[in-house]
Image (cartoon, helix red, strand yellow):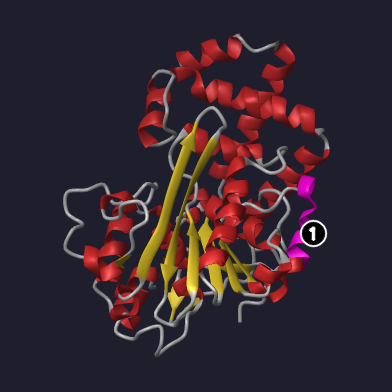
Amino acid sequence: MSNMLDYIRWRGDLSLRAVPLCEVDGLILSQLSMIHWEHWLNPGESAALASVADRLEGVQVSAGFTGADDARLMALATRSERFGGIRVCGYTQAFDPGDEMQFSAISMLLPDDTLFLSFRGTDSTLVGWKEDFNMAYSKPVPAQEAAADYLRRAARWFPGIIRMGGHSKGGNLAVYAAATADEAVLTRLTDVYNNDGPGLSDQIDARALYARLGGRLHSFVPQSSMVGMLLSHPDTFEVVRSDSVSILQHNPYSWQVEGGRFVRAAGLNRDSVHFESVFRKWLSGVDETHREALVETLFGILGASDAERFDGRYLAGLLRSPRVLINAVQRIPPEARKDALQALSNLAEIALRPGAGERDPRKNDPS
């Protein structure tokens, strides 16, 4: 089967003027927010995507866990007719451990005379992951406020149609910014792409915010979605087929593509349905104060090694030398220790448990 890289190889010779933006284009433009644009753009500058085609060697292209694929994406997109003419501008990034904030976004002027705002998902920093979990009790988190402000500023200087999107936390940021926009800006928004991003918190009246977006929202999750099942999500999400397993399906390069559409799955796998029910049950039984205490405890454990990044090397190190975690757990009060360890155990069991072939009959016709 094909993925979005194969899509560029197939459709890359046709401009966005010739063939309008589709859902796979929305994922590609969303993923471009993971790129380290500071290598090629100074503050306030803009550049055609094609202009960086010969300047990709020797730099760390991506901020995400999909770095190798992101480099391939840039190599293909910058040399394609479809994406090479896109003008990239408005790059911003902010990282503040004190405020527990990780935020980055990029604006893209498309050849069809529209603007696409792309919000970066969670990077590999502990701060970024902590902010994701803060969504369970904060209203709103700093990155959501930054995304809403980014949309307001973009709408002031660009008078036309605006689209926006992101993958993972970036999808959540796009949804939050669009759903909280004033009416004058909302009328200019035509499409909001949420690619396996967490839902909105019930603490900010998620149902009412989703209702404001109506048919503008395009929400996609893979069969074994876990990230996309967090918090409150719309009932209209589409389930796409991935060639990976379990939580690894969060990788958007594993999503299957046919033509300009994702290949639909019959529904969510049993693991995803179970994860959603466990998480919802946990939230419903824990008030906001205790949610915050549990999240702080969990990340106190994860941060016990003084590591700054939550990546493969970090996890491998913990597995080789778990004593640092054991010592950290011993410093936690017994009641909090029990809750934190049970939460970690539940998440690990769900992520690693087999059953990817099971389907949820409640969701989605495969057509």
Residue 73 appears in the figure: yes
Residue identifier under label 1: 207
In which image quadrant can residue 140 be found?
Answer: top right
Residue 338 left/right relative to 189: right
Which quadrant does the N terminus fall into? bottom left
Per the picture, the main secondary structure of the magenta-coloured stretch is helix
Question: Which residue is at a point 66% across and 25% down the rendered structure image?
Answer: 340
Callout 1: helix, strand or loop?
Answer: helix
Q: Is residue 267 above or below residue 141?
A: below
Question: Which residue is at a point 73% across and 53% down the rendered structure image?
Answer: 232
- Nearest the eye: 259 or 159: 159
Q: Amino acid at mark 1?
A: Arg
Which quadrant does the C terminus fall into? bottom right
Residue 32 left/right relative to 240: left
Residue furthest bottom as drawn: 18
Q: Is residue 284 above or below residue 149?
A: above
In which image quadrant can residue 314 be found?
Answer: top left
**What is the crowding at mark 1: few (fewer than 14 residues within 10 Å), some, or many (at least 20)?**
some
Residue 157 left/right relative to 186: left
Residue furthest front as drawn: 157
Q: Position of residue 277 (x, y in %)?
A: 74, 48
Q: Position of residue 338 (x, y in %)?
A: 70, 20
Question: Which residue is at a point 47% across and 67% down the rendered structure image?
Answer: 27
Question: Which residue is at a point 26% across and 47% down the rendered structure image?
Answer: 60
* Magenta stretch holds residue 178: no
Q: Position of residue 182 (x, y in %)?
A: 71, 63
Residue 78 left/right relative to 225: left
* Part of the protein shown in magenta: 202-211
Q: Is residue 259 above or below residue 181?
A: below
Q: Position of residue 73 (x, y in %)?
A: 31, 64
